[in-house]
Structure formats: structure tokens, C-alpha cells
Amino acid sequence: MRGRFEVLLVVSFILIAILSGSYAVRWFSVVALGAVLALFLFSGGNLPVLYRGLLAREKPERSQKLLSDFERTVRLVQKAKGGRTARKLVADRIAEMYAMASDDYNQTFRRIQSEPNRAIRVLYGEGDFLDNLEKSLEIVEGDIDESGGSRSQGEGSSERS
């Protein structure tokens, strides 16, 4: 009930400001509207949000279900086939894998970003992106298995085909 009163109050001030003929009444209405909106802002009150022209009490349900990490990664890889930005995001994910396996996440991530390791160089190599991605992930897997998760650079010596 409180939400309806607030909306009615704001709408009435707006109508008075627009429809009144007197200059002083218009200014009073504008100042009163500003005071009411400031009161909402500072008191933490929430005005209902209009969705698609209808006054909604709750947010509308999403038409798509929330995607799992796997589905997001699949979509990212599909976009990376033709786009540089998505390809960079895949390279960032690989750098995150190495960083999570190291003792110092931030330092390792920055180092791999500034000096790409073998897995990222293979990812950006010539040829089919999906083949390069597969080789790159095999290198990551080999490096992490070989070092037990403690290797920070990821410059492993074995490359599987």
C-alpha cells in the first residue's frame, strides 16, 4: 500500500507542475517533487520499476535459464572461432588456470599476460582455432599434471599431439 501512495504523490506533483497556470504554483510543485524524490533517495525507499510499460511488483522472469559454467564456456569457444575479443577471453581463461595452480595468483596472471607461455602461444598460432585450443589445453593439462599444480609459468617440455 505504501508504494501506491508514493507513486500517487509523485504523479500528483508532476501533474500540478505541468497543468497549473500560475508560475509560482509550478515552481512550488517542482520544489516539492524534488524534496519527495530526495526523501526517497536518502531514506532508501524504492519506487516500483516499469517493465515493458506495465507496473511490476517483481522483476520479470528471465526468458532464458541461467547458464552453467560449461555452457558459458562452450558459447565463448564458439564465438572465439571468428572473433579476437573472444579469443583473448579464452587466453585469459588459460592464464587463470595457471594462476590458480600457482602460489601467487596475481603475479602469475600478470606474468602470463605480459609474457605468454607456450600454451597461449600455441592458441594464437596459425591454423584452425579449435585444433590450437585442443593442443593448448593438452599443454596446460600436462604442465599441471607434471608439476602437481605448483608450476607458475607453464613452460612444460612435453607437447601431446
Image: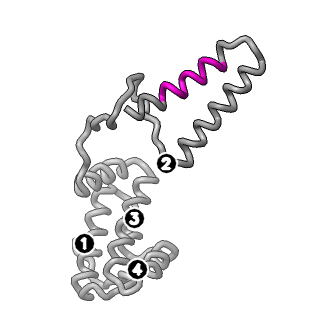
- Could you give the CA–CA distance between mark 4 and mark 3, rounded to whole angstroms? 16 Å
Residue 38's image quarter?
top right
The residue indicated by pointer 4 is 105
Looking at the image, tell me whether mark 2 or mark 1 is earlier in sequence order: 2
Coloration of the structure image: one colour
Q: From the viewer's perspective, is 56 left or right of 40?
A: left
- Could you give the CA–CA distance between mark 2 and mark 4, rounded to whole angstroms? 38 Å
The residue indicated by pointer 2 is 44
* Residue type indicated by callout 4: Tyr
Say which of 5 and 109 sits in front.
5
Pair 4/3: label in front: 4
Can residue 9 be found in the magenta stretch?
yes
The residue indicated by pointer 1 is 138
The residue indicated by pointer 3 is 91
| Image height of 147 relative to 95, above or below | below
- Could you give the CA–CA distance between mark 2 and mark 1, rounded to whole angstroms? 52 Å
Pair 2/1: label in front: 2
Pair 4/1: label in front: 4
Residue drawn at x 40%, y 57% is: 87
Q: From the viewer's perspective, is 85 left or right of 68?
A: right
Q: Quadrant of the N terminus?
A: top left
Residue 58: image x %, image y %?
32, 36
Residue drawn at x 25%, y 49% is: 67
Can residue 65 be found in the magenta stretch?
no
Pair 3/1: label in front: 3
Look at the image and give the residue range highlighted in magenta. Answer: 7-17
Q: How many marks?
A: 4
| Image height of 143 relative to 91, above or below | below
Q: Are marks 2 and 3 in contact (CB under 8 Å)?
A: no
Residue 56: image x %, image y %?
35, 30
